[in-house]
Amino acid sequence: MKTIIIAFMVLFSSQFLLAQENSGGKISGYMFGDYFYNAARDTGISSLSNVVNGGKKDLNGFQFRRIYFTYDYTISENFSSRFRLEADQTANTSDGKVGVFVKDAYLKWKDIFKGSDFIFGFQPTPAFEVSEGIWGNRFLEKTILDLRGAVSSRDLAVALKGKIDEQGMFKYWLMIGDGSGNRPETDKYKRFYGHIQFTPIKQFTATLYADLKARPNINDPASTTIPSETVANNDLTYALFLGYAQKDAYAFGVEGFMNQRQNGMISGGEIKNRTGLGLSVFGSYNFSNELAVVGRYDNFDPNTDSDFNGDSRNWFLFSLNYKPVDKVTISPNVIIETYESINGRSIDASITPRITIYYSFL
């Protein structure tokens, strides 16, 4: 009986979704995963637990890094909605299995005023949607702000985005969110996002991004008053992106960011701002519709203060992308990460070859 009920529910759901698709709805999704092999790790440094592709030396196996299932529905000429589920290796359930969570759940009011849309719900943040589009290889890796956790890819927020001028050469994106990503809000503090995009020609795009993540003040250890004076402890993030792309031919991009926590550390006996810097340079070239090469170099230093050494790193990715059909890509690739020496001790590079498979469906 239980099997019959489950089969009926599946049949009912499929018929419902089919009916929705025929009346303004659209179902889509994609998956990507790898066979990976951690060919090299420095086994003597415990801090290497935070390498981009983690795990011990000789660890190998199959993994799904992303599974998306998306339902878009056009409510009317001016209103639309999106509901998206994600499953990945980091969203584990209580018993360690791959978990599923709500990635997107938002309502868009198109042309709330001329040239601008209003969006409410779980939605993308303005930080790297443009750069990720020109990068075009999310299935290989995230762009640098996402990869290094400078800004979450999603937030529960309200946003306005649209054109500044009639031609759309200048665009803007403003957002106020919880600052908690896809997690429920737990405090009163919010995150404020701003983004300007400049596209003078079709192939070239530049973006300027900034956000403020408000945090509670902290006690000032230098204060001699009782009670202690407090100082700001907010997070400030700035980013600049320049990209040039010719569809199905080539793409190049440069992205840099600075992430600062006000009064985020104590150095030399005084409280200081903690500043992190990141730089990413990438390129891809299509030999044909089926074959392309991809390369990328990142440099990341989570704390630029001279008292904190041994934490910066260089990250390289090289890939050969083969598309046997339009919706399938097979990519032999390798990730190499090198590290700043710690107290004069050099650190062996982390090397992870992979075969990545990406495919979209429905």
Image: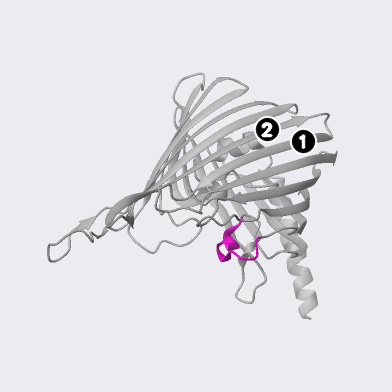
In this rendering, would 308 be left or right of 80?
left
Read off the magenta span.
Answer: 42-51
Q: Is residue 338 left or right of residue 29?
A: left
Confirm or deny contact between disc 2 and disc 1 (CB under 8 A).
no
Front residue of this view, candidates 200 and 75: 200
**Residue 67 horizontal side relative to residue 277, left or right:** right
Spatial distance from mark 2 to mark 1, Cα to Cα? 8 Å
State the residue position of label 1: 293
Residue 286 position in % (x across, y down)? 78, 30
Q: Residue at x 70, y 49 (%)?
A: 335
Q: Residue at x 53, y 46 (%)?
A: 300
Q: Quadrant of residue 253?
A: top right
- Which amino acid is tagged 2? Gly
Q: Secondary structure at mark 1?
A: strand
- The residue at the far right in this view is 324
**Which residue occupies the extreme front position in the image?**
344
Identify the residue position indicated by label 2 in the image: 283
